[in-house]
Amino acid sequence: MNYVLNDEKMFADVTDGIAIIINSETGIYYGLNGLGTAVYENLINEASVENILSALKSLPGAPADIETTLKSFVKEMVDFELIIEGASSNSEAEINSDVASESNFEMEVKAYDDAQELLLADPIHEVKEEIGWTPEKDSIGYTKEETKEREEKMEV
């Protein structure tokens, strides 16, 4: 089975080996641990769950229940709508053994809502596809007349 980022709702970034995925509709963001991030990166780089499992099983110290752990992690990401089924592909998976052992072969995805209001207040949510973002000029502290005067001065 192959998966891709649910890019209709989610924005994602990986920094220093940690993935952060933001749901643009709810303002909830999700953090993945090191091994979870490695699995996620393999998924979005078109590696199948089967190839990821094979890579995990080949690592020294891989626990006997790694298949159950992987399937549970993928199901959790699907349940959170972070990833959705993608086109079938057979890309090889690469998992760093240090990342796996540092994470104790655990894959975690945690949901956070502490920045929900801030993320939903972002004016990007006011974008209309046909006209783009047109903030109310009054909202920046000037009347419409003052704004028009300032814009006219800038055109000179």
Image (cartoon, rainbow, N blue to C red):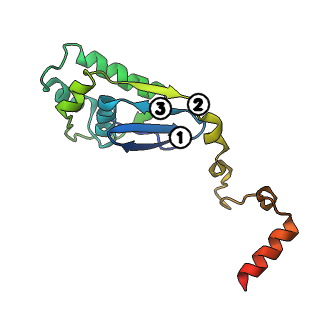
Task: Determine whether the residue tagged by mark 2 lies in a helix, strand or loop.
Answer: loop
- Give the residue type at disc 1: Lys
Does residue 1 appear in the picture of this structure?
A: no
Identified at 84% across, 70% down, the residue is 146
The vertical placement of 136 against 32, above or below, is below
Choose top left, top right, bottom left or bottom right for residue 32: top left
The N terminus: image quadrant: top left
Question: In the image, residue 64 lies at what x, y percent?
Answer: 19, 13
Looking at the picture, how far across and down is residue 56, in whole percent? 19, 26
Q: CA distance from mark 3 to mark 1?
A: 13 Å
Q: Where does label 3 land, which residue?
A: 30
Mark 1 Cα shell of 10 Å, populated few (<14), some (14-19), many (≥20): some
Left or right of 17 on screen, residue 80:
right
Q: What residue did someone put label 1 on? A: 9
Q: Which residue is mark 2?
A: 114
Label 3: few (<14), some (14–19) or many (≥20) C-alpha neighbours in 10 Å: many
Q: What percent of the width, then of the height, locates residue 45? A: 30, 43
Amino acid type indicated by mark 2: Asp
Tag 1 or tag 2, which sits nearer the N-term?
1
In the picture, the quarter occupied by the C terminus is bottom right
